[in-house]
Image (cartoon, rainbow, N blue to C red):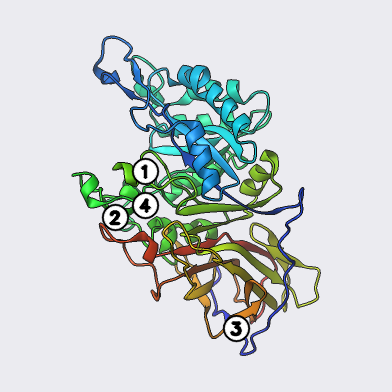
Amino acid sequence: MMRSGRLLASAITLVHALPAYADEPGQRRWLAGDHHVHSIYSARYEADPEHSEHLPDPVIGGDSSHTTLQNVEMARRFGLDWMVTTDHGGPRHSALNHDRAWPDVVAARKAVPDIVLFYGMEFDVPGGEHASLILPTDATERATLRDIESRFGKREAFPADPSRNTKARMIEALRYMAGLPVPPVLIANHPSRTATGYGEWGLHTPAEYQAWQEAAPNVVIGMEGAPGHQAARPETGKDKAHGSRGLYGGFPTMGGFDQMVARLGGAWDALLGRGLHWTITANSDSHGHWREGGADFWPGEYPKTWVFAEPNAPDILDGLRNGRVFVATGNLVDQLEVKAAIGPTSPRTATMGQTLAIRDGDELDISIRFRPARTPNAAGQLPKVDHLDLIAGGASGVEGDHNDSTRIVRRFTSRDFRADGEDILVSLRMKVSKGTTYLRVRGTNTEQGEPEPDVAGEDPWRDLWFYSNPIYLSGEEIAQ
């Protein structure tokens, strides 16, 4: 691999107008959503399936007391445009989903038609933990989910079948999904919740996630950047994880984000440096609300996944597949555009999820537009962005689960912010070192230079972050 040079930013800060956010019906615009929400059909079981002689009965409401309709109504209350219902499985759970959860989805769609409601599940990953499985909205979705869960859900069989719980079986499942006429979308949930330290992975490693995407590139799009359970409080439980954001008991989240994402030059940057188009998301993982003694926020109450799409199911899935996505906690921002262009008037431009072809000698004009909070969030606060970082990386420093080529190109503070109506603009012209293959942005309401490990019982509303997904660069390398 070529050695990475230093990223250079010009001393002149330029402000370029970006296209206005679309707000006409039928046009793409930023739509807020949550892809990981549980209902009463995330059942518990009256007996341990592995030690029971008879098929145990599911306890409806055993792991969440919220109905699908209640979840959708709260999603609308907290400003979401789309949501996925994702109940996890158990022995013969595919029949429970098919016979009882599905009719509730149909009823909720009729009752709250302004929310795009996807049918899916928290897939019990063979050889691992969980992933959000999102079905395309069509005439086959009910049967397709039953088919996938009955074939591949690791806890579906009774008696329990150890052969279903292997990592090879997960690859088989992904290839099966990829071969469906209209493939689903799959997002890895809480990636390093089982880690025991920084980079000391538990059930899932970055290399495993790379293998997932290589097996099904049209299905596996990425992972949760900000996991759910962010309202966890010490008094709600006695186990080690309770009180820790995300219920991460081995190694904490950092600014509410999984260590794979939050650590500069860490696992996410390593995956990007290997050439993967790997998208991060955020969600509530809502089971029980904190006011009810649970560890969770309602869908949309704290984290949001924003997708640039038309307000319909096919284009929202297209936006997820193609990385037109940013995430934010606490409503820190509700619009974000990151644009790279070869010169201020060039037609060669790219935004989040897109790839910009570059040639030797090109210079990039980078424009970042964000819309800060205009109304108080669910905590009654009006958060302000303290600073944001433009980050770049490439393939030249990738060693294992680290990417040493990842660097902060420029930190923008309030001194750099330029108002444009309700939006804030910052930009710069930059030369790019050899081997640079992606650009991304993050921002926070804190003064932290890097996200700090979260401590049990901290107030998540005082530690807010947003992350863009990458712009990818390809072609001849730019000369310094």
- Answer with mark 4 or mark 3, whichever residue precedes in sequence: 3
Please give the residue where the numbered disc 2 appears in the rendered image: 251
Q: Amino acid at mark 4?
A: Gln
Residue drawn 44% across and 71% down? 445
Q: Which class describes the residues within 10 Å of circle 1: few (<14), some (14-19), or many (20+)?
A: many
Looking at the rendered structure, the secondary structure element under dot 4 is loop
Precedes in sequence: disc 4 or disc 1 = 4
Q: Nearer the viewer, mark 4 or mark 1?
A: 1
Residue 9 disc label:
3
User: Residue type at mark 2?
Assistant: Phe
| Residue kind at label 1, given as amino acid type | His
Residue mark closest to the camera, 1 vs 2? 1
Q: Disc 3 residue type?
A: Ala
Pick whichever of labels 1 and 3 is earlier in the sequence.
3
Answer above or below: position of 466 versus 446.
above
Task: Please state the total of marks drawn on the protein image.
Answer: 4
* Circle 1/circle 2 CB separation < 8 Å: no
Which residue sits at x=69%, y=41%?
A: 312
Q: Residue furthest bottom?
A: 11
Q: Which residue is mark 1?
A: 289
